[in-house]
Amino acid sequence: MTADRIRVWLGVALLGLLMLGSFWAYEVMRRNSEERANGSKVRSEPDYFVEDFNFVRLSQSGNTNYRVTGEKLTHFPQEDEFEILHPRIVSIDEEKTPMLIRADRAIVKQKVKESANAKPEDQIHMINNVVIERAKSARTAAIIMETSSLILYPDSEKMKTDARVKMTTLRATISAYGMEANNADQKVRFLKNVHIEIDNKIENRIENKVVNKVGK
């Protein structure tokens, strides 16, 4: 083999090594990029669920604050949120009348800041066929409130909705769009398009309905 042929074959071999080296470097970079992308993603599938659960929350004093039950509780790690099917939330306070809140579904979000200056607070988003029921007591009248969506703030005992809401009391039916309520001071504020109908005949009907459901 002449010297010229040897130089040609060496050149071809070096070119082949360069091509293989470039391909290897490309594969390493591609695999590293995929691994980083996959590592940064959190699974969108639920990582656990609990059926027929009963959760009791305690206040800072150690007393029971409220009880949450439901058919199924599912945790989604991507958002770190909980979904509850057919939730039932009962507020328990020795100084206040028990209140029952139920819906088709609920999403529990933890430590949400609604604004830059707001304090992080847990939220329970009640969705579809939301019903709030409070029995009659010595200090308060029986009520039934219905809406399509509701946000509960268990830490501050507040709730609100931007949807249409209807509240039935002993002698009146109130409908409006938007509502804010504070269970701590037992006050309700309707936001707009408020309409009130007076009906003395509904007193016994609503009182019996609320007492039966809240008592269960």
Image (cartoon, grey):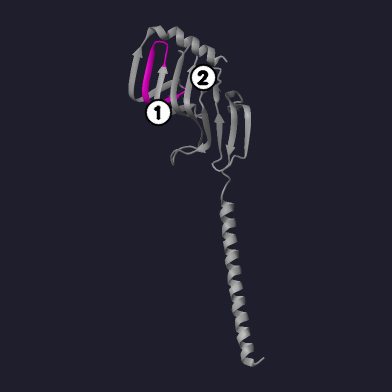
Say few, some or many: other residues with alpha carbon within 10 Å of mark 1 (under 14 / 14 to 19 / 20 or more).
Answer: some
**Count of all numbered marks drawn on residues in the image:** 2
Front position in the image: 53 or 113: 53
Above or below, 166 against 26 in this view is: above
* Residue 177 falls inside the magenta stretch: yes
Q: Residue at label 1?
A: 163
Q: Is 12 placed left or right of 113 in the picture?
A: right
Q: Which mark is residue 99?
A: 2
In magenta segment, residue 182? yes
Tell me the element at label 1: strand
Q: In this image, 23 relative to 139: left or right?
A: right
Which amino acid type corresponds to the residue marked 2 in the rendered image? Met
Q: Quadrant of residue 161?
A: top left
| Residue at (59% x, 37% y) in the render | 75
207 relative to 183, above or below: above
Q: Secondary structure at mark 2?
A: strand
Q: Is residue 38 above or below residue 133?
A: below
- Residue 128 percent location from the top left of the image: 47, 27
Q: Which residues are magenta?
A: 168-184
Residue 21 lies, in percent from the top left, at 61, 72
Residue appearing at x 42%, y 14% in the figure: 169
Residue 51 coordinates in the image, percent (x, y)? 63, 29
Q: Residue furthest bottom?
A: 2
Residue at point 59% right, 32% down? 73
* Residue 69 in picture, x, y percent from top left: 59, 25
* Residue 4, numbered label: none
Q: Is residue 144 above or below residue 45?
A: above
Which residue is more in the foreground, 12 or 137? 12
Residue 215 makes an appearance in the image: yes
Identified at 38% across, 13% down, the residue is 172
